[in-house]
Image (cartoon, grey):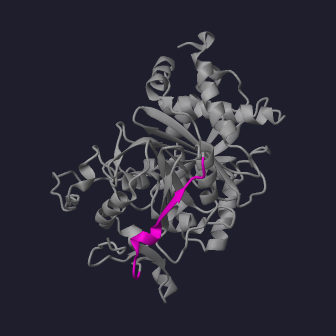
Amino acid sequence: MSTLATLPETVREEVLSRADLAWLHADEPTNHFVVTSLALFDEPLNVDRFKTMLSQRIELHPRLSQVITTPLNPLAGRRWSAARDFDLAAHIHRTALAAPGGLKALAAYVGRLAGRQLDPGRPLWDVHVVDGPGRGGALVTRFHHALGDGQAMVRMLLSLTDDSAGAWEKPLRRPRRVSGRRRAAPRMPHVPNLPAMVRQGVQAAGTLARLTLFDPDPPTSLRGGLTLLKGVAWSDPLPLIEVKRMAQASGTTVNDVVVSLIAGALGNHLRDRGEDTCGLRIRAMVPVSMRAADDMAMSGNRSSLVYLELPVGVTDARERLMRVKIEMDRIKASLEPAVGWLLVQSLGLLPKPVEQIASAFYARKASLVLTNVIGPAKRIYLAGSPIRQMTFWEPQSGGLGLGVSIYSYAGEITVGVVSDRNLVADPYEITRGVVTELEKLREPGDSW
């Protein structure tokens, strides 16, 4: 098979959105703004089948064959442009873990990848086919956040998968185009409610002022100087049905329950290091999708950022869950997601050095990035191979060195952790802590 993928005859150039620019500029020497994901298989992935499938479907994703260019007129804005002599094979790497090649060896390999920068002169993605762990296989993907936000990335990756083992051999079916010129029913002219607009504007200004005036997060070992050495870990799968049962019985959501488990694990980690957590609360920066319900785009960024307080000093599992619920409900009812979205777009208007100063200013008000993505409810296949477990790691920005992700797939939830080794040498301490906190909710005294 030729190493050159079949691409559309014309790939339309596009100007980067302000949000795309914001994430492009977020790259720092010790933190590359790259989303890393992992799929685990019970057997090695067939590389030839994978290459064939990818060459057939890559035309669905123009961003995968584009580079970011700067026009001669700087006022014209940076653009997504077709890469010259695009070579698909140059983005597919294969490696084998040294025997015995268990999960820890795979985590060490992914951690080394997480510290590497993607080549800005090529399309901003790479995939790594891994033989192992053990007799199994894995696929590691790395996509720069400028390509798209969490929802777009998930849709992009899932477009490469199928619902059955043999579906990868079927001819590619292009998505049906939907015309934007849909005839709408007649409506009465909209009359702006000026008092409501003024009131909302004042509330938004107040929200921005409050976020800006937040004190920096309290000093803990989760914050500090960063290096290029990264560590990754992922939890044993948590049964979604059990987490749902706990959520229903407590009047909370699945997300509330898992976030409370993470807060408990972080608190235990700090106490194990001899730190006083009495009354301690730390903030997480949480991406929030601003996409419309019918927005099915597989590229581009439309995510806001909000601050979520984590009650890491609360050791009682049930009390901690209730506090998380109250905080989550407060954010949902506030203007913080909308204000955060305006702030992200504003950062994209700034020159890179100024944007990084502003990002660092807001990042000092948090200790970690926390992301939640909902994956497929049923098991899926990649190039004919069933995927057993999936997880991902969100990049950090502005000097943050810890990221925690929540991913649900096929009736299970996996919590992933990526850390700078100068801050958390063994991120498995946190993922094991999540499982421990779930066990506490199973105890008779905390039964639901």
**Front residue (pair 308, 270):** 270
**Residue furthest to the top:** 444
Quadrant in the picture for the N terminus = bottom left
Residue at x 74% of width, y 35% of height: 269
Residue at x 60% of width, y 67% of height: 117
**Front residue (pair 212, 306):** 306
Residue 157 lies left or right of residue 224; in this view the side is: left
Residue 85 coordinates in the image, percent (x, y)? 39, 81
**Residue furthest to the bottom:** 72
31 is higher (above) or lower (below) than 366: below
Residue 48 coordinates in the image, percent (x, y)? 36, 61
Residue at x 60% of width, y 21% of height: 439
Residue 422 coordinates in the image, percent (x, y)? 77, 52
Residue at x 20% of width, y 51% of height: 187
Whether residue 2 is visible:
yes
Indicate whether residue 62 is drawn in magenta. no
182 is higher (above) or lower (below) than 329: below
Whether residue 323 is visible:
no
Residue 86 lies left or right of residue 75; in this view the side is: left
Residue 445 lies left or right of residue 82; in this view the side is: right
168 is higher (above) or lower (below) than 417: below
* Quarter location, residue 4: bottom left
**Front residue (pair 140, 228):** 140
Residue 29 coordinates in the image, percent (x, y)? 68, 67
**Span shown in magenta:** 84-99
